[in-house]
Image: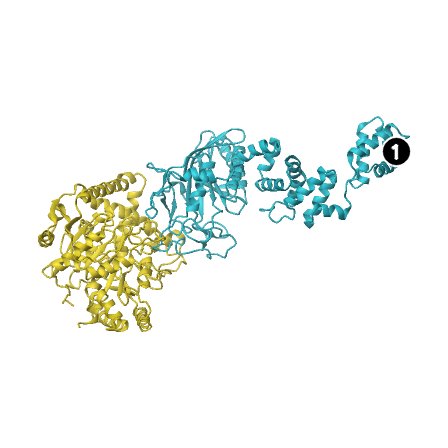
Chain colours: A cyan, B yellow
Amino acid sequence: MIGLEIHAQITALNSKLFCSCRGNYRDLGPNTNICEICCGLPGTLPVINQKAIEYSTMTSLALGCKVPDKIMFYRKNYFYPDLPKNFQITQYNVYGFSSIGVDGIYELDDAKQIRISRIQLEEDPGRIAYSEGDMNVRNSALIDYNRAGVALIEIVTEPDFTGPKEVRQFLNKLSLTLEHIGVCDTLLEGSVRCDVNVSVEGGNKVEIKNINSFREVEKAINYEITRQSSLYSRNLKIEHETRHWDDRKKITFKSRSKEEEHDYRYFPEPDIPVIALGIDFVPNLKKRMPELPNQRFERFVSKYKLSEHTSNILINDKKLADFFESTLKVHFSPTEIANFLITDFKSLIEDDGESTDYLKNLKVKPEHIAELVKLIEGNKISRITAKDILVKIFESGMLPSEVMNNTNSYKIADEKTLMDAVQSVFDKEKSAVEDAKTNSEAINFLLGKVMKFTNGRADPKIAMRIINNRLHNPDK
Amino acid sequence: MSNLHDLLAYEVVEGINGGLFTAEAYISSILKRIEDVESKLHSFITLDSEGALSAAKTIDRKIREKEDTGELAGVTVGIKDNISTKDIRTTCASKILEDYVPSYDATVIRHLKENGAIILGKLNLDEFGMGSTTEYSRYQPTRNPWNLDYVPGGSSGGSGAAVAARECTVSLGSDTGGSIRCPASFCSLVGLKPTYGRVSRYGLISYANSLEQIGPICRSVRDLIMMVNIISGKDEMDNTSMSSSPIILNNKLRKLNVAIIKELITGSDHEVTRAIYSGSERFKEIGCTCDEISIKNLHYALPSYYTLASAEASSNLARYDNIRYGFDLPVEEYKWDTYFSKVRENFGEEVKRRILIGSYVLSSGYYSKYYLKARRLRSLLRSELLTLFKKYDLLIGPTMPILPFKFGEKIDDPIKMYLVDINTVIANLAGIPAISIPVGFSNGLPIGLQIMAAPFEEQKLIDASYHLENAINIQRVTNAI
């Protein structure tokens, strides 16, 4: 059995959860994004960020959770050098009060249901910088509070996963959902973290902490299942313990401290009164709620008549799907544009290497693709030429028509020109011509040669007709 | 005219604005007074004479140039040393904050400065506000200006003694379980704990957030009104603050329904009881009804208070790890956890005791037995009081059940010390306003009467207090120093 505890930063926020420091602390000098409040100076009080409540509510709704009428915050007390107040302001589900989201159901693509126990809004601690080992063996450590107080959404699932594959599916879908709501850019370094509970063969639960990207989660689970199964097969006890994931060595290791014995002494945060969300809050938010991946999928299939396969490829890459819809606004030809994007366009981008925001700095704009598809549909260029033109647009940002004129890439549909081309090929490939009279595969070989001869510009349908004519009526 | 330092706040404002004397002359008189008496009293932890003088000169310049000087022009305010003051060391009378200089002003300090008040310095208290005598200050105890052998009350003992001794015009204290009203009572002053939320707590170094409020300690009701109006108001930096209407000075008290709390009378010393009854006569004289009533849930108040206050304190004080601010203790030769323990040895005994109690009542297995039960008792008491306020405008009784006592008398027995707070914690638990007003003396030791009202009914408290102040012509100035 596997259960997850996911922490996702609300990267969409301009400010931290309880003060006006920047929400985006990345690329800033150490301790430059701090104030009295997020450093926990004596006498300071938290001031709740209303937007954070909205974003966490949207996340709860997207994960099928109930959102209560009233929410409150709790203090989780523990000592740690990166925690400025030595308590964390978080939420807690007890004594009739609940966190922002509770009792959700999230469905995987194969209709398997994962229960969400709760979703809470809380603050991120700062960061400790030390090169190796932990603070008990190092002489000193440095603390950067730039991250302290950044809004986090904690998502806790029931132990409903049976294996790493389901976890991967869940995390992929979750990332996509968070991206669609606009809550969290999961590709940003440190924006998502995951703790995993694993138990095999009815043994003790082992918690793995410190998994700092969704990609590593599957590896950590695989390692842990192997480790525990091997203990079990040798009749050794699986300890109830907390382990950490070492993402360089790709192993889990036992924590030095006895974290599982913590008593967090939760109690209601006296500085933030109970927040009544109001009866209009959730309905209003639902109206403003961005489209979720499932809804988008339905729309792509029904409105654009795309195949489920094509729709899935687009939806699973939100930025590509957005690009697709922008292109439609210029030229409405869903099937043609979708096919072009998920094949030639996507492979070209993937060759380019995956960067976090690959479409942002792209020279190819929706206008380019729209024009290119128009040229294909108007029979002005062949698909092969279109791909070549795309490569050139990628480099130059020129319009397809410009590229086409500069490189003389018009599709050759002229009978005379094509007959000359076929003649040249027939002259060179005499044995293939003989073969082709009885073997259709050899015909395709000849067509390929014609295409190559014309740099891919030949209209393949016309070229094929001419080849067939020449084969069967050699005198004409 | 008597000495300038004897003037009340409204007289100072009138004098300076009317050109009778300069702000600089007034400050000089105050500083001279401090020089004369401070060595006997120990009211101050930090005195900012230079800052005060320079602020006075600014006011004098503004007056010459006919600029607005603000409603508190030239009034010197002593600040309890648990309220953050930018660039002035703020210690909470603790060794753990010995070198801490805040980078920001508490909201109340900002309001005072904007209105021309002069921040004179920081006043002594029991460490982090935990105590009723200033004996728990980690520096030295403050003495009672009415009799130097006696405690001035606490925890805002410095705020009481300094005003009573005319070392400053008025002062700010904070009140978590009586810390403004106790020294006001012991030093024969007017002290108000406002309704929870009336005054912003931003910058008040938390002891027990859900109970405490900042409030003024003054020598007259009129001064108190000026102060309350300046420091009140909704503050976006404090989620628990609320807006309220300003208080006005009513010369005539309308007839109110007053009730004496029986339990508080029977539990008090004889001299105290007599003074309270004689004070209540002043209400009857003008036709107020004056019943005696009983509060059913009163015996839960003290245990509930100490449970909740300690719980919150144990969490609030966790931040003192000496990483970002604090005192001088080099980190070399320590591991993180041993350094942390070493740092926290620096808390005083009473603070350690409350951290321990607080951690205990919050720990799993004890949470519902103690903390949760205390919260339930708190809301029981609050609803009972709110019901009483449907019938009565004011609830009265002694502020302190006993007269001021001598140093060392109760310090060895924490329970004895906690018991003196029995009358005052009620208002903190219920979040209601409460005032202490002088009603007499016994053997030269002051006695205060406490009045409580429904939330945000400060106007009634002040009307009643102003009436008492005029009706009981009490000795204003101590001759003990």
Secondary structure under tag 1 reads: helix
Image height of B326 relative to B40, above or below: above
Q: Give the quarter of the image for residue A426.
A: top right
Q: Nearer the viewer, residue A45 or B336?
A: A45
Image height of A213 relative to B163, above or below: above
Residue at the right extreme, as displayed: A475
Q: Return the x and y of residue A30 as percentages of the image width and height.
A: 48, 56
Q: Return the x and y of residue A377 as percentages of the image width and height.
A: 71, 37
Residue at image position (85%, 32%) is A432
Residue at the top extreme, as displayed: A438
The answer, for residue B410, to whether it is visible in the render is: no
Q: Return the x and y of residue B346 as percentages of the image width and height.
A: 31, 56
| Pointer 1 residue | A430
The quadrant the N terminus of chain B occupies is bottom left
The answer, for residue B241, to whether it is visible in the render is: yes
Q: Return the x and y of residue B77 as percentages of the image width and height.
A: 26, 64
Q: Give the left or right position of residue B137, taking residue B470 as reference.
A: right
The quadrant the C terminus of chain B occupies is bottom left
Q: Residues within 10 Å of mark 1 (few under 14, many from 20)?
A: few
Q: Nearer the viewer, residue B364 or B72?
A: B72
Q: Nearer the viewer, residue B393 or B169?
A: B393
Residue at image position (26%, 39%) is B369
Chain under callout 1: A
Q: Give the left or right position of residue A229, taking residue B230 as reference.
A: right
Identify residue type, mark 1. Lys
